[in-house]
Amino acid sequence: MLKRILVPTDFSPTSERAFRYALEVASRTGGTVVLYHVYEQVEAGFIDNETKRTAYNQQMETDLLKELNRMNVKYQAAFPKVIVSTVLGHAPVVDNVLGFAEEHRMDTIVMGTQGATGLKKTLLGTIASRIAEKSDWPVWLIPEAYEWKLPQHLVLATDYQLADKKALPLLTAIASVFGADITVTRIISGHITREETAKEQARFSEYSNLLQKDFAASSLSFQLITSSSIIDTLEHLEEEIPYDLLTMVRLKKTFLQRFFTESFTRNMAYLTRHPFLVMADDA
């Protein structure tokens, strides 16, 4: 389940943190890691002479492979039993990364992510968040300021969807790898009526009992949180529930929903200060 790990890199310190995280996971699962860089070859519009253009692209590829190997050597000494492959791919980045994951049957993708604000967030997003939005594979997003520590507390933010329940086998496998516990949480609005709050509490209790029955062998706890702002609460969730990995399921949307609404998981990719695991609802 966590045996084949793909780590796209742009050689930034953030992507190096993601590589370290992937090595930590692979060292505990007996997995392998593919360190992967996507680049764009120079076309005729930049260098007209075909011979010179070919030589330039070959040299660029050689230099990039050296950089991949440098990054591998820097970190793999601490993980001598983990097999790491270094691979180059061609742009466009998002489609190439996802195509590689499909062709080589990767189990998961681990990437570094950087924050973005305002117009940049609205129009561009980060490569990592765009991959997380389109990926059929679980995507771990490692924040730029994150320093590795052993994950001991995992959180699944639920919306009572069937997909949330489907996410638990992977989450319990991760918990087993790290010896961690799991908290399933639901955040509800503090602006609803008492009657609506009572209904939410009853529904959460019913949902908790169902999960406890289906995952009796796992260490699950449950916490219902009332909040005036769900986004703000998730951004500062560690104040409510100390955690090391937040998991959310990316639900499918209709065309109109995609057109008119922002992705909640993309917003969280920018906001979180802890590793963030995004799963597709059919992953």
Image (cartoon, rainbow, N blue to C red):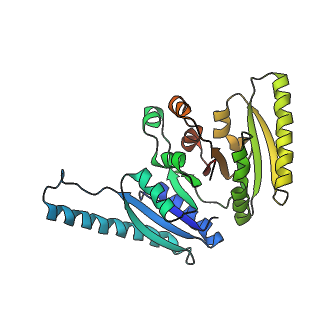
Q: Residue at x 70, y 56 (%)?
A: 171
Q: Residue shown at 84%/60% (left/top)?
A: 217
Residue at image position (69%, 41%) is: 237
Q: Considering depth in this image, is 138 or 26 the residue closer to the camera? A: 138
Q: Position of residue 147 (x, y in %)?
A: 58, 57
Residue 189's spot in the image, x, y percent? 73, 28
Seen from the viewer's position, the closer of residues 11 and 215 is: 215
Q: Nearer the viewer, residue 182 or 170?
A: 170
Task: Tell me where residue 11 sits by quadrant.
Answer: bottom left
Asked whether residue 187 is in view, the answer is yes
Horizontally, residue 22 falls left or right of residue 36, namely right
Residue 60 position in % (x across, y down): 28, 64
Looking at the rendering, which quadrant does residue 186 occupy? top right
Q: Position of residue 101 (x, y in %)?
A: 50, 60
Q: Quadrant of the N terminus?
A: bottom right
The image quadrant that residue 54 belongs to is bottom left
Residue 114 in view? no
Residue occupying the point 45% across, 48% down: 127
